[in-house]
Amino acid sequence: MEQFLIVFSGRNSVMTLSKYLKLYRIKHEIISTPRQVGLSCSLSIVVYKKDMPNVLRIIKNGKFANYPTIYQIKNNGIITTYIRTM
């Protein structure tokens, strides 16, 4: 199933988004930010494509210090790549 990586520049935003996702029962996983992405925060959130409209609505309506960078995760079984979408 297609997944997206959500990367903020600060750890607090990751934890706040996770709290909202739990509240709305949206499946997600907090992971270490892949080094290929190379942004400053050490944590990121992975969500499924089917949940992205709701995730984006939560981000838009939430009180976050900054807007995240969002990547589509592509995995061919051998190599994982991250394609910036927002």
Image: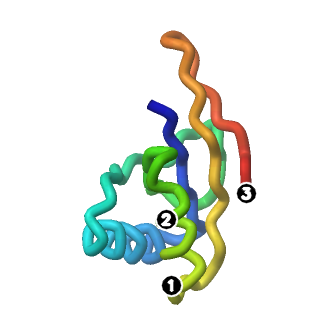
Q: Which of marks 2 and 1 precedes in the sequence?
A: 2
Residue 53 location, x and y as percent? 54, 61
Relative to residue 67, is residue 54 drawn left or right?
left
Q: Secondary structure at mark 3?
A: loop
Quadrant where the image shows the N terminus:
top left
Q: On residue 76, which mark appears?
A: none
Residue 27 location, x and y as percent? 31, 53
Residue 68 sits above or below residue 79 on the image: below
Residue 16 location, x and y as percent? 39, 77
Residue on which disc 3 sits: 86
Q: Amino acid at mark 3?
A: Met
Q: Amino acid at mark 1?
A: Gly
Residue on which disc 2 sits: 55
Q: Amino acid at mark 2?
A: Val
Question: Marks 2 and 3, how far apart in space?
Answer: 13 Å
Callout 1–callout 2 Cβ contact below 8 Å: no
